Every structure is written in structure tokens, then in C-alpha cells.
Amino acid sequence: MKKLFLLFGAALLFASADAQPSQDSLYVREHYTKMEKYITMRDGIRLFTSIYLPKDQSKRYPIIMTRTPYSVGPYGENDYKRTLGQNMLLAREGFIFVYQDVRGRWMSEGKFVDVRPDIDHKKTTKETDESSDTYDTIDWLIKNLPNNNGKVGIEGISYPGFYSTASLPNAHPALKAVSPQAPVTDWFIGDDFHHNGALFVMDAFSFMTGFGVPRPKPITPAEFKNPVKYKETDNYNFYLDLGALPNYKKRYLGDSVKFWDNMMAHPNYDWFWKAMNIRPHLKNITPATMVVGGFFDAEDAFGAQQVFKALEKQNPATHPNMLVLGPWFHGGWERGDGQFFGDQNFGSKTSEWFRENVELPFFKFYLKDEKILDLPKATIFITGSNEWHKFNQWPPKNTVEKTLYFGANGQLSFAAQKSKNAGFDEYISDPNSPVPYQDGIQAHRTREYMLDDQRFAGRRPDVKVYQTDTLKDDITLTGPVIADLFASTSGTDADFVVKLIDVFPDNYPDPKPNPKSVTMAGYEMLVRGEVFRGKFRNSFEKPEPFVPGKVTEVKYNLPDVAHTFKKGHRIMIQVQNSWFPLVDRNPQKFEDINQAKDADFQKATIRIYHNDAALSNVKVTVLE
């Protein structure tokens, strides 16, 4: 399970930002008393709950709760967590900390359902969801825990982030502050397992081989003996050798992972996926919300941005709703100091700053009646210029949309070239030799691919590169990035991957020290990349084939960005049709890819057009 925790952030609940974890552990034991309870839900199911009470009972404390499918361990009232809260600033401030195994996971009773759908209007006590389980838990806590002040906050990262979001509809009156952080939100459109209908096969398979195997009864993780075992040393070759998706079940999964079977049975955005989307239910919300995410989050960058936008759109302007986006990997705001990630130095300790100046004040204000909260609607770190900015809305109001047009000979410009001729770039896309998502050899999916050097990809003949001239002034992008491609294929389906890249000057200095011997001169930093499965270009519910050779528009949104392209740099766009093994291979013919055969994968001739009648481009939002 360790690998799964690393992938999906559960280990963040146990990780400390403090440089001296032994002191943290000692502090927890000296200042908190642990107890374990089964709390009964309205339908009689009991949920295992681990509670840490401050030993100083001379005052009342608010409650901070995290509900998780990843285990509340360690189990046993004499075995303590080494840290409490998502960072030790919260523990040292003084709260009651509550951790709960969600329904059907580990020591809790009941049946587990992945991303359990919300039921807005429950007709009987037998109808339960994560909102009702949270409500019933809070009701028990405030009535039974000694010296609580009647106020509750909830936070969680990744899957626990989903449970944070799910606490919001029909919330208990005592729930005052909720912080969904990198929340799982939509497993077909943008998070974890699919992006725009394309399967993120490496994450889905590696996660479900452990997490997806059901436990036979309430047990601790130490008693769990049934994960699907496999070995990979080179993920590119491992997944290429596995072949078509039905082979995953035949060779490894069998009938052990129900969710994999469900996923394969629902290749389009039907009722199965729509029911798991929590966003339509985020209405009439009463707790204050602070959504947190990382621009370089490999799992749930989509979720953080889209939960915030749904809350903004579907609730009154008076509802306290905040967004924090930083230069972080998945959960990176709670781990380390946040100054470095991959090859990039962001110039300050961004994670420490967030914990001290944003997260702690948020919970103190809403749970402890602190008098002042100086937080804007959106607290955004802009990479490139490496500065925190405060905005009254997100995306910011003082912006203008501009268009980067593709041109002949790999040119990219804010001014469209005049071209009445054919005006296209042509290449062969071969799913049997897909474009790798990252340079080098990796055993498992890395998190650094989100901002790594893209020079390795641009050298391939099946990756088209467009770049601007050297920038004469800084240009800052804050907000949406929209790819608007005009393309054709000799096949009947195609994936499209668009990458927005910051090209460093040829005289850019290497870091000092430089233990990885990275060459920063000419570095091509990935700012944002996203895939789109072409058959969904008009509808995620009803896919359509391409007409071979016909110029077709494929237009889609990439997650928002906040990045300054500095004077002397260039802006680059790369376009490709595979991103492997991050994304499963498209056979490049119209079919249910989940049921494809090994023989189905075929080469296709792809054309990217840039003439007056079909002018491929990328729209960006420029901060003025």
C-alpha cells in the first residue's frame, strides 16, 4: 500500500512539515489523549473513529476532522500518530483532532463505494451518503466529546479531499469551515483516472491493484494480504508489453477489482460517471470554504480549480469561499518547505508560507473566533516571476484574452500569419511507438513530469513544435488556456496532447550546486499539458468518429495556469497524439477502446492545419 499512498496523498496525513518528527511525536503524546470509538450512523452502520483530545481541559476546543479511505492508523489507544492535523502548526495551536475510516473501509462497517454519489433529498434513513455520514458523525462528536466548543472544521487531501467536499451539501450546523484540498472531483473529465475521456492507465492500474481489492471484513491495513502483485522496472515497456486494456484483467486483475470492471463497462460519460460528480450538489452551502491545490499536481489539479468554480457559481456572493493555488505537487503544501520542485527554484518557502499565513489563520478565524482574517478571494503563486498575488476573483478581472496562432515553419505568434494555401504540418502517429510522457527510465509514474524539461519530446518526428520569437517583455498568464486545433487523421479516432512550455534563454545559468547536472540553458519547462480523446470533441456522452482526411476542429480547456514568461524567454506549444504510459494508447480507429484487441492499434497520418480557413491556436488569458 505504500506506493498507493505516495500516488494519492494518503501519506500526507502522516507526514510532518517539521524538520524534527521525533519532537512532533513527543509533543503529540505529551499534549493529547487518544481514544477510539465506533459512531453509529442513522442506518445502524458503525464507523471507526480515532479521536485525539488535548490534555489541557481548562478551555474548550474546536474539532478538526478528516474522513479517509486510507486508514486512520495506527490502531489501538496506546498507539499514537506521530503528527496531528495536516501540519503540526494546527496541533500546537490546540484543536480536537478526529479521524474516521469511511463506510466500508478498514475498521468501519458497511459497504464501500468509490466516490459515493450524493443524494440531495433522502426519503428514508436507509438512504445514506458521505454527507449524511459526516452529519451523523459531527452530531455525535459535539454531543459527546468533552470541552468541545461546538464548532467543527474538515480538511483532507486527494480522496480525503473528496470527503471534505462531500461534507458541504446539507451540512451540520456545527460545521463552520471546510478545506477541500486537491479533491477527487470527476474521474472522467479531469481527475486521476481520466482526463477528457482519456484513461490515465498507469495511475488507475497501480492504484486499483491495491486499493480496489476489497477487504473481507473490518480489518487493519496490517491484516490486508490480498493486493494484486506485479513488478515493473521500466513503466514504458511494462505497459507497452501489457497491450490492449482487456489484457489487464486477464493477466492481473481477474474478478478481484470491481471498480476496474465498472470502469471498463462505462467508456463514455454516462450515469455511472455523472453520479460521482459532486459539483452539481454544491448549492446552498453554509460552511466557509477554502479550496487548495497545486498547479503541478499530477493527480487532482482539475478538482481543486473546479470545486472552487462550482462553489462560486452556485452560491451567493456572500458565501465565504477562497482559493489557494501554489507551485506544488500533490499535497506539496503540507510537505517540506515548497521552495524547490523538480529542476525549479521558486525563490521562497511557499509551503511554509501557506501553512503559517493561510491555513492556520483560516481555521483559527472560523473555529476559534479570531478577530481578523486577511485573506482574499484567491491567493495565487505566479511561477516564473515567483511571487504571491492576491486577487478579488479567479480568474482575475484585469486580464485580456489573447491568441497564440500556429504558423509555418514552427512559428507561434500573437498575430495570425496570412496563408491561403494548404498550410499544414504532417506526421505519422504510431500507437506501437507512443511518445513517452517523460525522459529517461522510471519504474513508477513520477510527479516531476508536470514541469519537467520537454526537449526530449520535441526531438521526435511525431511531436510538432511551435514557438514564439524571443520575448521583448514579460508576459503573465493567469487563468484559462484553451487549445483550438484544426486537424485531420487518416484514421477514425485520435488523441491530442497540447503542452504549454516556457523556453529558457540559451545563456540561462545552471543552478549552484547542481547535483543532477541539469542544463538550464534552453530548458523547456512544462507549464501545462493536457490530453483530449478526439471522439469526445462534440459530446462526452455520445462519441463520434473522425471522417478520414477531413479537417476537424478539436477544442478543449486545459487547467488554469499562473505563470510569467520572462523577457528573453520564448513561449512554446507542443502537439502530439500519445503521452505514454501516462495515458492509454488510442488505437486510432473508432471503437470502444476499453474492449480493444492488440491487433487494433494502427498508424495514422495526422495533419495540424494553420491556414486562413483552419487556423490552429491556443487562447491564453494575459494579466494586465
Image (tube, rainbow, N blue to C red):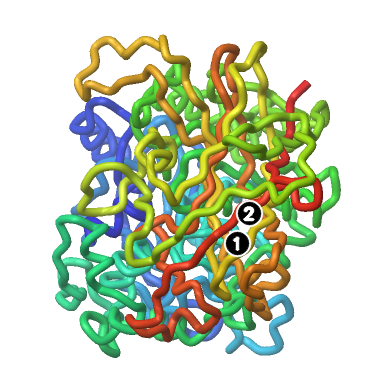
Q: Is residue 172 above or below residue 586?
A: above
> How would you rate the neighbour count of disc 1 (Cα within 10 Å): few for under 14, some for 14-19, many for 20 or more?
many
Discs 1, 2 touching: Cβ within 8 Å: yes
Q: Where is residue 254 drawn, in percent x and y?
A: 26, 88
Q: Is residue 270 above or below residue 185?
A: below
User: Disc 1 and disc 2: Cα gap in Å?
Assistant: 9 Å
Q: Residue 143: in sight, yes or no?
A: no
Q: Where is residue 8 drawn, in percent x and y?
A: 37, 55
Q: Where is residue 132 drawn, in percent x and y?
A: 60, 72
407 sits left or right of 10 in the view? right
Label 2 is placed on what type of residue? Leu
Mark linked to residue 167 = 1
**Residue at (35, 52) in percent of width and height:** 436
> How would you rate the neighbour count of disc 2 (Cα within 10 Å): few for under 14, some for 14-19, many for 20 or more?
many
Q: Residue 141: in sight, yes or no?
A: yes
Q: Is residue 173 above or below residue 424?
A: below
Q: Is residue 440 above or below residue 505?
A: below
Quarter of the figure with residue 112: bottom left
Label 1 is placed on what type of residue? Ser
Q: Which residue is mark 2?
A: 175
Disc nearer the start of the sequence (1/2): 1
Mark 1, secondary structure of its residue: loop
* Residue farthest front in this picture: 421
Q: Where is residue 214 drawn, in percent x and y?
A: 30, 81
Residue placed most toward the observer, 548 or 467:
548
59 sits left or right of 244 in the view? right
**Residue at (60, 66) in percent of width and height:** 534
Mark linked to residue 265 = none
Residue placed most toward the observer, 334 or 597:
597
